[in-house]
Image (cartoon, grey):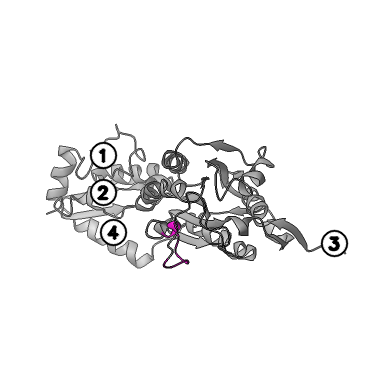
Amino acid sequence: MAASTVRLTMAQAIVRYLINQHTTIDGEKVPLFAGVFGIFGHGNVTCLSEALEQVQDRLPTWRGQNEQSMALAAIAYAKAKLRRQIMVATTSVGPGATNMVTAAGVAHANRLPVLLLSGDTYVNRLPDPVLQQVEHFGNPAITVNDAFKPVSRYWDRIVHPAQILQSLPQAIATMLDPADCGPAFIGLPQDTQELAYDYPIAFFDEKTWEIPRPRPSVDQVQAAADLLKTAKNPLIVSGGGVRYSGAGEAMAKFAETHGIPMAETIAGKGAVVHDHPSYVGALGIEGTDAAMELALNADVVLAVGTRLQDFTTGSWTTFS
């Protein structure tokens, strides 16, 4: 009878799981996780780095020079890949982790996926204090990694190797959410990384993820269409969602067919070619005069794929 489990350290299990996650781009199956940026030290060098070293041919690792810059590079990769592929960034415990908080904030604000794996304080607390480790001696349950909570879409600290069976799939589902994706942070205590556990073999089966594309209700679409029919000065605002969903061509065709001028947000740049006849430039604090004038005089604004943040709306002073 074939074994139903395989014994691995938690670090090995994390790496094996990541390798077996895939997605589809233009009909081709590709790795969901394209690689790892890492700076190794206390908390991630003896377990996670060793596990990564064993699979360099399948999950390449590149050494960073600064934690913030490598995490920002990981975020830029996700943006360039239209959020369909993800990079991992791993740091040591303490200041290595704190250097990455600002980058997590950038990913959080811009809805860009990145998997952040940081070393964490020992669960058994016996080796404390650890060099460069930042912990709260008045509350041992708090570590510096709690600083990631406000800037993560998903946050977890693994204190038992079985917990990744639930945590990793949930982190990926969060990072692939088309509306609310962003950074997923998982803290990895060093003594938990090294623990061996009998993982279900099925946990490591290859999986191909699809990004869900929720559709609006028919009533919502009809209501928007009815408003546009009565509009005398309509304006389309094309956001990052248009770019990430590959809807730029359809958006441009719609605008041209109905003769509606089309502005873009900062996140939406590149979704529509700049010389399109309906294109009037960016909107907001870095917007063009044409787009701003049209926004001030618009009686109906069709916002597509945008959350209408203050950079776009000028804190709502852009629209009359």
Res. 261 in view: yes
* Magenta span of residues: 138-146
72 above or below 146? above
Q: Is residue 202 left or right of residue 285?
A: right
Q: What is the three-letter code of the residue carrying label 2?
A: Ile
Callout 1: helix, strand or loop? loop
Which of the 4 quarters of the picture holds residue 228?
bottom left
Q: Earlier in the sequence, mark 4 or mark 3?
A: 3
Disc 1 target residue: 278
Disc 3 target residue: 2
Q: Main secondary structure of the magenta part?
A: loop
Q: Is residue 39 left or right of residue 13?
A: left
Mark pair 4, 2: CA separation:
13 Å
Q: What is the three-letter code of the residue carrying label 4?
A: Ala
Res. 85 in view: no
Q: Is residue 142 left or right of residue 225?
A: right
Label for residue 236?
A: 2
